[in-house]
Amino acid sequence: MPLTLQRGALLPAANFIDGHWCDGADGRRLDVADPASDTVFADVPDSGAADARAAVEAAHAAFATWRKVPAKARAAILRRWNDLILAHQDDLGRLISREQGKPLAEGKGEVAYAASYVAWFAEEAVRAYGDVIPAPVPGRRMLVLKEPVGVVAAITPWNFPAAMIARKIAPALAAGCTVVCKPAEDTPLTSLALVKLAEEAGVPPGVLNIVTASRERTPEVVDVWLADARVRKLTFTGSTPVGKHLARASADTLKKLSLELGGNAPFIVFEDADLDAAVEGLMAAKFRNGGQTCVCPNRVFVHEAVHDAFVEKLAARVGALTVGPASRPGSQIGPMINARAVEKIERHVADALARGARLVVGGRRLRDADCDSPNYYAPTVLTGVTADMACSAEETFGPVVPVTRFAGEAEVVAAANATPFGLAAYFYANDVRRIWRVAEALESGIVGINEGALAAESAPFGGIKESGYGREGSRYGLDDYLHTKYLCQGGLD
Ligand code: SIN
């Protein structure tokens, strides 16, 4: 079924380069499928190297003037963009749900989440302060200026098609940078709609450019940007292997990098925790977007004294989740993004069961009149999970809760840290000394303490270890798009 929006203009289905909506240079197209029905409902350009080059030309030319636009004027444009995004919350929410699969309420929630980053960076734009440094000798003045880094390449993921693009593009524009963007191949339409609204908000031609491309042609686009020394920064959210590749490939031009990569979040329930609160926190953190977020708990450790009671409460909640298409009121878990994602979940569950885990609830692909595509998976709880299982070592990125029993604090902290990743970690406890000890011992960029919902535009989002570097959101998020320039003037005595 074709998608109809209240405002058809939000479906440009074209690249946006130098202020023009255009086809790809060679006219190839990329199908966009609805994961709920596994059917194609739209298409966009399948761009290549020529389009990527045109986007950089435009962004490079526009940088010369955009960087000089006063921060207050850039902020006003961002505020208008925020207002337009919120004014189109229904259409954008439907678009997200249609191409990404999350339930409509979550889709609309994501629109508000995306807008919150735009509003935040509109306010931060005017606070890119420098410093005046006391000089060590007479007759000298020493200052620090913050300057925009230049052209930014933003490569965004499919799991939050609006929020991830907003939290990369808004700080870039706020800082005075210009942007070339390649959205995820599964979810290009939301990004194009956001760029359309940015155009309407008054972002000048060339400042924001977007090209869409298939999985196969993405390297063609990205390689152009990696090789081009005029692209001074790359910001990427996605897998750790791709992030490592981008870091290596950026080395020749030494681009500034922000890499928000994979996670393997531990979620620890200590024996003194409020179990009901812990179950609620886990439900919120694990099942957001059907388990397809980088900060979803991937390894759940429960103290042996409360293990059985916790699992019983958890299983009751997980078993009651409603799975169905995003468009159906009442759906809590939509389809996974595509069949490959479901195959990975199936592989993880099969591996865990083969190695001795116990299935408490779920554990199967769903295919019936309600779930009419190969992309649905039943919310699942496994117990007896051990570190050697694939679901402990890799991000499952789906609605599976693998539970491991533990006996002591030192043991569980060591287990939680026994991963190359360090994006998010969660724990529930009441003893205030333990809370500080564990919060400081966890090797993670983000720690939730008695809280499962961590994301906010005012907070720094990002990881350590192989989860990457750089921060998005918060006052730190602007810095990633700025250079620090030191000015020293002598002879003033
Ligand atoms: C992500 O999954 O990469 C982002 C999740 C969030 O913003 O909370």
Image (spheres, helix red, strand yellow):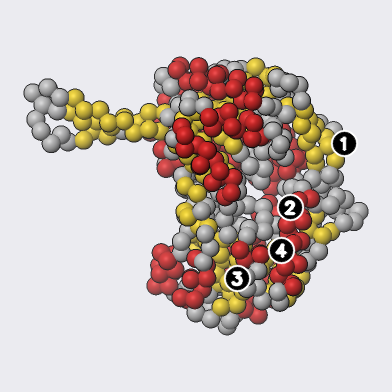
Q: Amino acid at mark 1?
A: Met
Q: Is mark 2 in CB contact (under 8 Å) with mark 1? A: no
Q: For residue 1, which numbered disc appears in the image?
A: 1
Q: Residue furthest bottom?
A: 305
Q: Is mark 1 in CB contact (under 8 Å) with mark 3? A: no
Q: Nearer the viewer, mark 1 or mark 4?
A: 4
Using the numbered discs, state the Cα–Cα distance from disc 1 to disc 4 in whole angstroms: 33 Å
Q: Which residue is mark 2?
A: 341
Describe the element under mark 3 as helix, strand or loop.
loop
Residue 468: horizontal and vertical position, in percent?
Answer: 50, 49
Q: Amino acid at mark 4?
A: His
Q: Residues within 10 Å of mark 1 (few under 14, many from 20)?
A: few
> In which quarter of the view is residue 6 placed?
top right
Using the numbered discs, state the Cα–Cα distance from disc 1 to disc 3 in whole angstroms: 44 Å
Using the numbered discs, state the Cα–Cα distance from disc 3 to disc 2 in whole angstroms: 22 Å
- Visible in this render: residue 6? no
Q: Which residue is mark 3?
A: 387
Q: Which sits in the foreground, 189 or 429?
A: 189
